[in-house]
Image (cartoon, coloured by chain):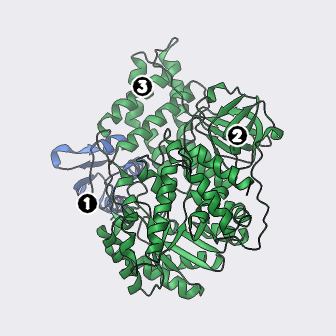
Chain colours: A blue, B green
Amino acid sequence: MIERTIEIADPIGMHARPAGQIVKLAKESGVKILIGRDQGGMIEAKSPIMLLGKKFKTGEQLIFQVEAEATQANQILDEISEYLGN
Amino acid sequence: MDLKGIGIGEIAGEGEVFKVSTTFSPTEKNWEESADKELSKLKPAIEKVASDMEQLAQKESDGEIFEALSMLVSDEALFDSAVEKIQEGLDAGSAFNRATVEMTEVLKDDPDFAERANDMLDLAKRVWAQTEGVELSLEIPEGKSLILVAEDFAPADTARFNSSVKGVITKNGGPTSHVAILCRSKSIPAVVGVSEVDKLRPGEKVLVDPAGDRVVIGGAMADATVTMSYIPEHELPIIPVYGNVGNQGDASAATSSGASGVGLFRTEFAFLNQENRPSVEDQAESYTNVLNSSPEGEFIARTLDAGSDKPLPFLGIEAEENPALGVRGFRINDADPEFMNEQLEALKIAEQRSGKKVSVMAPMVARFSEAKQFAELAQSHGFERVGIMVETPSIIFQLKHLAGVIDFVSIGTNDLSQYLFAADRLHPKLGTLLDVWQPGLLEAIKETVRQAHRAGLKVGVCGEAGSDPLLAIVLAGLGVDSVSASPSQVESVLNALRCVDADQAKKIAESAFSQNRATYAREAAKAAFLRR
């Protein structure tokens, strides 16, 4: 499992499109992706609406955990970072 | 029988009533046969709606929204929750709708996400309609003569209008609603704000008669209100007519329409669908293309008029309760001063590349200090002619201080009406307040002309008012120095302004000013024109 903290740079926070993209990425790669503000509140990226419901805002530092080997996990994390406006 | 409304355009259209139901309001109910049967309906319904959204994503310029919607409607957690509700007894559509309502509840109190929650509820309705076999997406048959009738049309619907559409009737909406603007630009006859649309039956013959502000059930072209015919009597119009331009296509249309320049170049187009801030070079290239296709003569570029109602991701404008009253137009400059510098630099480069003289003006200027700030900025970039839009009532009373500071003003009648009458431009029920013939608006224009001329400033009108041929005569009679119309209207405005001399225009304006209602003002101007 690889963990990385990513800041939301997108000026309107984690809106529908990036939320959808992250879920799609998890689904298509078959890899489990967990997201949260802190270790205690990690949720699995399975539902864009549930991600929206977390109201992640611009400038927040989010923890991402990807259950894959390093190369693939880092690739996935790079993509997520891009979805979030970085 | 006649139904009253607000006419958009001059020419009438006839055809068969084609009712479009954009509202679908079913009531929640339980299934009768079996949960399995409902389950088998749900998945295909969701898939159909998701694929409709994907199709729109490919087709429309703001496709990203539709792509996101397609992802939301396919949400697995939402599906699972709907399945549970079906097992508890609800039918497929009701279950999906209830699940959506519950899941989006948490989003509703947050301004950043509230709009997505509304979109989701709309999608849930679409899925519901699918499960009941009701067609909600607008499919217009080809090769017919149809008059579309609906409560209102969303931008996604108007994108589907084809050549079968000979006219449009809506229950809601005013002269500046989405559908009105689209119909005007495509020259589709329309009557909006028709409260009695329910009296129209599908398939019956109907005449859309915008010149008469009415719909005639059973009517034909022969019944159309005789439009004012403007047969030019003079070589030149009494004041110049320019075109309003938003992109290169408009610029070419303005050129072929006979416009003697561009009175309003909306620079927004260079920024639409841009995730990142376009470079000076990218901007300069888009502007040069527009300049090269534009008619010779005047060219007035308006700096970016964006706000939280038309947000640009790279400007970092936050969502607001009242976007029309928020950080928009020139106010963006406070949030991001570099942005306007870059835009002016790009416009200057485009001026040099095209060899056409460019004047610049700023939108949403409310105070003397803002006008002065903009003028200094534009002059530092080497622009000789600088102006501001008159949209906020406050600036009318400051024009006297602007002598020698700026060169001209351009009245944006759509926004001026909105702020003068405190009536949202897009509000479906306030259309009549925004009628360009409202005496209150005409007086505001008159006062603007008086104050501006005293300060030695030229006055143009670039709002919807400048596209109405009869009103253009009234404006000329008030002393307005030029009008700018949408390219499709330039020719009729030109013809109207070639029918009268200065004295006649003045008399026509005076008769309109003797009236205290919009409809009377229009009638009085018409009568004065006919007996001139």
Q: Which mark is residue B83?
A: 3
From the top left corner, tell me how far across and down residue A54 is, in percent: 27, 44
From the top left corner, tell me how far across and down residue B221 is, in percent: 81, 41
From the top left corner, tell me how far across and down residue B65 is, in percent: 47, 50
The kind of residue on which mark 2 rests is Ile
Find numbered disc 2 in the image and state the secondary structure of the residue it sits on: loop
* Of the image marks 2 and 3, the number of the one nearer the N terminus: 3
In-image side of B435 versus B325 (left or right) = right
From the top left corner, tell me how far across and down residue B83 is, in percent: 42, 25
Q: CA distance from mark 1 to mark 2?
A: 47 Å
- The chain letter under disc 3 is B
Residue A73 at least partly seen? yes
Query: In front: B258, or A23?
Result: B258
The kind of residue on which mark 3 rests is Val
Query: In front: B31, or B266?
Result: B266
Residue B182 versus residue B90 in the image, above or below: below
Q: Which residue is mark 2?
A: B140
In this rendering, do the residues under marks 1 and 2 share a single chain? Answer: no
Q: Which mark is residue A6?
A: 1
Residue B501 position by quadrant: bottom right
Q: Image quadrant for the C terminus of chain B?
A: bottom right
Find numbered disc 3 in the image and state the secondary structure of the residue it sits on: helix
Q: Which of label 1 and label 2 is nearer to you?
A: 2
The kind of residue on which mark 1 rests is Ile
Q: CA distance from mark 1 to mark 3?
A: 35 Å
Q: Image quadrant for the N terminus of chain B?
A: top right
- The chain letter under disc 2 is B
Q: Which of label 2 and label 3 is nearer to you?
A: 2
Please name the residue shown 44% across and 28% down the image. B96
In this rendering, do the residues under marks 1 and 3 share a single chain? Answer: no
Find numbered disc 1 in the image and state the secondary structure of the residue it sits on: strand
